[in-house]
Amino acid sequence: MGPTDLTMYSNGEQIKMHKYLLYLKSPFFRGIFDLDGWEVGCARATIEKLRSADLPSQTRAPTNHFMMYDNPDELRIVKHWLYTSEWSEEYSGQYPMDLAVKVYVLADKWGLDTLRAQVPERLIMLFGCAAHNKIPDFIATVRAAEKCSSASQQTLWEVVLEIFRSNALVLLRDRYIIDLVGDMPVLRVDLEAMGLLGPIAV
């Protein structure tokens, strides 16, 4: 693909990418580049066919620099997906479910619909895996899912509720989960509506 021509800075780290790859796959960046008057002459070609030599000389713009407020691991996962169409396990960290929610938010911002659509299934898969940090990770995931949910966007919240439904006996016996339910009225109301909580106070 030739040398990278875009650098993202996040928490003191640099993540380098190809501008034309972002142009092809992300409506968010396409809008930015279009405003800058930057065009990709072969934008309709597939990524596999793109080579540096294929790009018209006017598209070889100077390196662009973006200050990002996302976690570097989120950016690395999205970058890996952009280049391979696969989810990277390398940067999952201590709380992979919580990280998946943050990737969902970033994919939504960048307009990466296919990546965003993979997150709900991944959350269910990750919860099903034996992991020492499952409960702390799930608690962080619930809080993150509530934060990014809205009246018109309930996808992740519905996944959270489904995990509660499928694992109620385990989750609702954990004191940290009980504290979480007590701290989140929206969660308590939804769990009561599902018949998972009794009339006693949490």
Image (cartoon, grey):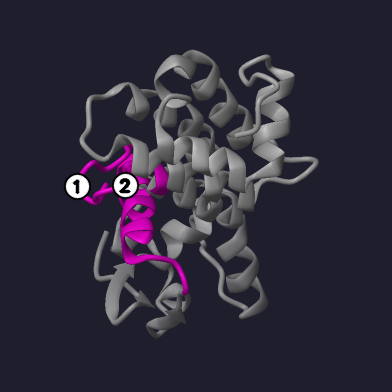
Q: Report the disc number at residue 95.
A: 2
Which residue is located at x 35 percent, y 44 percent? 136
Give residue 144's position: percent from left, percent from top: 53, 50
* Quarter of the image where the N terminus is located: bottom left
Q: Secondary structure at mark 1?
A: loop
Q: Which residues are magenta?
A: 69-98
Q: Is residue 148 above or below residue 190?
A: below
Say what amino acid the circle numbered 1 marks. Answer: Glu
Badge 1 crowding class, 10 Å Cα cut-off, few under 14, some 14 to 19, many 20 or more, is few
Secondary structure category for the residue under label 2? loop
Horizontal and vertical percent position of residue 164: 52, 23
Residue holding disc 1:
90
Query: Which residue is more in the foreground, 35 or 120?
Result: 120
Q: Looking at the picture, does residue 153 appear above or below residue 148?
A: above
**86 or 189: nearer the viewer:** 189
Quarter of the picture holding the C terminus: top right
Q: Percent from the top left, x then y, of residue 173?
A: 42, 24
Residue type for callout 2: Tyr
Q: Is residue 74 left or right of residue 12?
A: right
Q: Which mark is residue 104?
A: none
